Image (spheres, grey):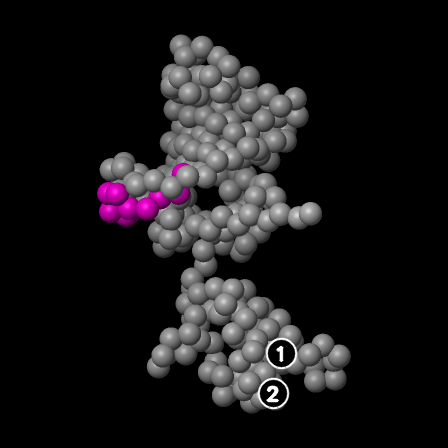
Amino acid sequence: MKIAIDHKSPVPLHIQAEQLIRKMIEDESYQDGKVLPNEVDLAKILAISRSTLRQAINKLVFEGLLVRKKRVGTKVNKVQVSSKSNNWLSFSQEMKLRGIKIRNFELHVTWVYPNETIANFFEIKSDRKVLKMERLRGSMDEPFVYFESYFHPRVGMTGDEDFKRPLYELLETEHSVIATLSKEEISALEAEAQIAEKLRIPIGGAVLLRKRFVYDQGERPIEYNLGYYKAKSFTYTLESRR
């Protein structure tokens, strides 16, 4: 990518430097911890002072996008998964929006009898089977989330669907079910043996449990979802306005 700023622009130099470095962070060649050009060289390339450049870098370090290490330099921080509460998307869409390539480590689809909690949520009897989908997903290198999704029989899923597609897009195009409302709960817990094994963390390791309750346009329940996230890989951002 081109590394340059416009000295004739009315935009302050430190702001231009910040914007440029943000683009560098997003570039594949600088992802996953690659070190940026050192401050002396980068300041010369941009024809700005080191103090101006450092002002831009300090802001990005404060935001957690960059990390400084002695005798190493400034490098791009490893991407953390981030989810904003006011931007409800399927997991695939969330990750695509953030430029994170996702790998599916496991995918299992079965028909099961719901436990009391799930049966009550769906307002069905516990002797009526529901479709359960389990997915272990993560970056190209390691898994960071294990999902358990249960679907109301009303949705009409068969288990033969292409679950590599974004889930809510699949529901809409193949079953005419539009996911409209999502309610969520986030809690912290210690990983039990099954979750620890799947997420490749020690038993008792930190996990964030994200419960998602999904409803259609008529506010009828369609999905009960449990997501177990490796805590060090997940940040949940809450944004509020008045």
Q: Secondary structure at mark 1?
A: helix
What amino acid does circle 2 point to?
A: Ile
Quick check: 204 left or right of 139? left
Q: Secondary structure at mark 2?
A: loop
The local crowd at label 2, few if under 14, some if 14 to 19, many if 20 or more residues have their Cα within 10 Å, is: some
Picture residue at 49% right of the left edge, 24% below the top = 151
> What numbered label is drawn on residue 48?
2
> What numbered label is drawn on residue 14?
1
Residue 232 picture location, percent across and down: 37, 53
Picture residue at 60% right of the left edge, 87% below the top = 48
Quick check: 127 left or right of 20? left
Residue 45 visible (yes or no): no
Question: What span is colored magenta in the figure?
Answer: 200-209
- Residue 218: image quadrant is top right
Q: Looking at the image, do the residues carrying marks 1 and 2 touch, with CB atoms under 8 Å apart? A: yes
Residue 191 picture location, percent across and down: 29, 40
Front position in the image: 61 or 101: 61
Q: Main secondary structure of the magenta part?
A: loop
Front position in the image: 38 or 11: 11
Q: Quadrant of the N terminus?
A: bottom right
Picture residue at 38% right of the left edge, 48% below the top = 231
The local crowd at label 1, few if under 14, some if 14 to 19, many if 20 or more residues have their Cα within 10 Å, is: some
> What numbered label is drawn on residue 154?
none
- Residue 193: image quadrant is top left
Q: Give yes or no for residue 206 being in the magenta stretch.
A: yes
